[in-house]
């Protein structure tokens, strides 16, 4: 990604834990104060910045990480400009936002690289065992089929 930003009110205690992740992946935090309790000004800031970036004409794709239907029109507008819109969010994401994206990936299916290796009782399988694991092979085939486009690319 050329531009990696994350939006929020970084003065709140619930976002302090993000510092290490932001540094590790070189993600720029964008400060957005909460002007009113119960309202989220972050959505508006994200949409304005995304439109500014869209109009530069320098991007082939946008990734919107949210489960909020407020980004449905943004995803549609990005696609109208001929740019790919990827969505990432929880399974609770409204269907309208999912449909507005060229491709939507549910965050519940994503895992950190070391997540499985640190699980109790984890034992690495060799190549032969993996090939003989029919459940795993079918799971991978289904995942590729579900994520492939009209030309077969996943």
Image: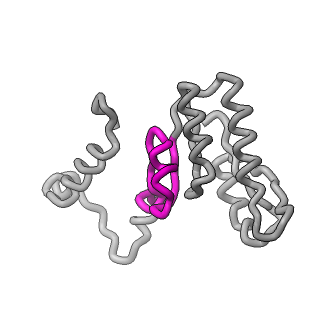
Instruction: Look at the image and give the residue range highlighted in magenta.
Output: 86-111
How many numbered marks are there?
0
Where is residue 59? Give x, y as percent: 61, 27
At 64% from the left edge and 48% from the top edge, which residue is drawn? 25
The reply, left or right, for residue 134 in relation to residue 115 is: left
Residue furthest to the bottom: 120
Q: Quadrant of the N terminus?
A: top right
- Identified at 72% across, 60% down, the residue is 19
x%, y% of residue 36?
A: 84, 65
Q: For this rendering, which residue is in front, 91 or 153?
A: 91
* On screen, residue 65 above or below 55: below
Observer-nearest of 59 and 24: 59
Question: Measuring 66% from the left and 42% from the top, which residue is drawn there?
Answer: 4
Q: Is 10 situated left or right of 62 in this image?
A: right
Q: Would you say residue 32 sits in the magenta stretch?
A: no
* Up-down relation of residue 3 to residue 59 (above or below): below
Within the image, what quadrant is residue 77 found in?
A: top right
- Asked if 6 appears above or below 20 in the picture, the reply is above
Percent x, y of residue 79 = 53, 32
The foreground one among 76 and 6 is 76
Q: Nearer the viewer, residue 131 or 148?
A: 148
Q: Is residue 152 visible?
A: yes
Image coordinates for residue 114, horizontal then vertical, percent = 46, 61
Color style of the picture: one colour
Residue at 32 percent across and 38 percent down: it is: 148
**Viewed as shown, does residue 41 lie left or right of 140?**
right
The verdict on residue 100 being magenta is yes
Q: Kindly give the residue lying farthest to the top in the view shown.
A: 57
Q: Is residue 114 visible?
A: no
Task: Give the position of the C terminus as an image quadrant.
Answer: top left
């Amino acid at each position: 990604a050329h531009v990696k930003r994350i939006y929020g009110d970084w003065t709140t205690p619930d976002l302090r834990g993000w510092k290490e992740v932001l540094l590790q992946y070189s993600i720029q935090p964008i400060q957005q104060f909460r002007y009113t309790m119960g309202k989220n000004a972050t959505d508006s800031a994200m949409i304005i910045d995304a439109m500014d970036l869209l109009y530069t004409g320098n991007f082939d794709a946008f990734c919107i990480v949210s489960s909020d239907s407020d980004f449905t029109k943004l995803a549609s507008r990005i696609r109208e400009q001929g740019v790919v819109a990827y969505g990432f969010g929880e399974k609770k994401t409204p269907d309208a936002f999912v449909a507005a994206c060229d491709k939507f990936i549910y965050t519940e299916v994503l895992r950190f690289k070391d997540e499985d290796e640190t699980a109790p009782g984890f034992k690495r399988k060799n190549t032969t065992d993996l090939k003989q694991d029919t459940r795993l092979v079918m799971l991978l085939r289904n995942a590729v089929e579900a994520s492939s486009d009209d030309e077969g690319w996943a």
